[in-house]
Every structure is written in structure tokens, then in C-alpha cells.
Image (cartoon, helix red, strand yellow):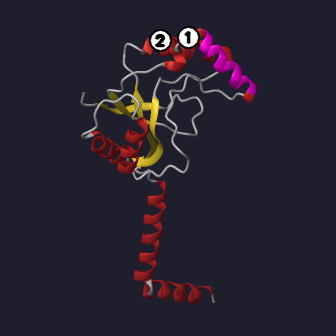
Amino acid sequence: MGSPRTHLVRVLLTKFLGLTALSLLSLSISMEASNVQPNKAQMKNFYSIWALPPEDLKPRLKKLMGELRSEFNGTEFEPHVTVVHAVSLTEGDARDKFKSACEGLKAYNAKVVETSAHCCSHFGYRNSTHYMPHLSLLYADLTDEEKKIAQERANALDENIGSLSFQITRLALYKTDPEDKTFKSWEMVAECNLDT
């Protein structure tokens, strides 16, 4: 009896060999595809646009930021004014949109809100909260009381920081992973010099 059953199985396999081969081929392809990582051009990351302070101001800002960071256990980051917050895009799309957004922009002092709206429109980003331009001096997990103390300390370390004004002549496209609280993965991808 074992032999006829084996024969029957062979006949069925022979009869359905095309279908079986197709199923195995399909399974093999889908398994292989799930193990393949998307190439760099297809990978999405988070990108932000930052307005960069002038080079001659950076040492002053970095000194103040460093003192606050050491006192309040903060994280190191580059001085900047956020123009567009983290948007998920491929690097190619982010570069193209950044280049397009920079075209025709001129250097500015206090027109950050207009620049933000202009750049956000190129990125298709709609901010759910009102945009309040600012230059962060400290990123740390602080209570409200500690924030107040940090602000007072910043004013004591640099009496004129609250009235600081400078011209923005450069924008930068940064890869900024919002999940990375160390900011070590944050990196500049492109920079644009604005017309003066």
C-alpha cells in the first residue's frame, strides 16, 4: 500500500508541478524581499531647517551654552534657530525641497516667522502650534523651577543675551532624529548662503 500512495503523490506533484513551482518561487521571492533593506535613496529620516547664527557670534553662544549645559546636565548641540521642525522625507527629497526653499530668500534679522512659513510651504509642513522663533541655549530635562533658574543664570553669564540681535545669512538642512535625545546622530546635510 505504501508504494501506490507514493505513486499517487508523485502523480499529483507531477500534475501540479507548475503551480507548486510557482508557489515556491513566490514564497522564495517574498522571503528574500523581506530581508532586503531599502537603499539609502528610499530611506526616510527626519529633516529640519535651521537658521545659523553668524560665525563671529558662535564662540559667544557656545561658551554660554557650554556653561549652562555643565550646570544643568544638558546635551550639546549647535546654536541655531529652528525654521522648519523635523519632517519625514528621503534625503533626496529633503535636499531638493531645501534647495527650492532657499531660492530667492534674502538674509534677514527678525523675519523668522515669514521665512518659516516660506520654507514650511516648500516642505508641505503644517505646524499645529503657533511658531515662536527662538535660539535655544539649553536642552535638558528641567522642572519649571529649574528652567527659571537656568534663565536667570543665562542672563547673569551674558547680560545682553536677552536683547541679542543678529542677521541670518545662512540656512542649513539637518538630519534630526527626534528619538535621539543625545543629538549625536544629528548632522548637517546641506547649507545655503542667503542673498544679502
Nearest the camera: 5 or 85?
85
Which residue appears at 40% of the width and 22% of the height? 53
- Counting residues from the start of the chain, the first of labels 2 and 1 encountered is 2
Measured from the top left, where is residue 33 in percent x and y? 44, 59
Q: Quadrant of residue 116?
A: top left
Which residue appears at 46% of the width and 30% of the height? 81
Q: Is residue 150 magenta?
A: yes
Q: Are marks 2 and 1 in contact (CB under 8 Å)?
A: yes
Labels in figure, total? 2
| Residue linked to disc 2 | 60
Three-letter amino acid code at the position of disc 1: Asp
Q: Is residue 1 visible?
A: yes
At label 1, counting other C-alpha atoms closer than 10 Å, the crowd grade (few under 14, some 14-19, many 20 or more) is few
Measured from the top left, where is residue 10 in percent x and y? 49, 84
Measured from the top left, where is residue 92 in percent x and y? 32, 46
Quadrant location of the N terminus in the rendered image: bottom right
Element under disc 2: helix
Q: Quadrant of residue 153?
A: top right
Which residue appears at 37% of the width and 13% of the height? 56
Three-letter amino acid code at the position of disc 2: Arg
At label 2, counting other C-alpha atoms closer than 10 Å, the crowd grade (few under 14, some 14-19, many 20 or more) is few
Q: Relative to residue 103, is residue 165 drawn left or right?
A: right
Q: Relative to residue 58, is residue 130 drawn left or right?
A: right
Which residue appears at 55% of the width and 11% of the height? 158
Element under disc 1: loop
Residue 173 tag number: none
Measured from the top left, where is residue 159 in percent x and y? 56, 11
Q: Is residue 49 visible?
A: no
| Residue linked to disc 1 | 158
Is label 2 or label 1 in front?
A: 1
Q: Which residues are magenta?
A: 145-156
Quadrant location of the C terminus in the rendered image: top left
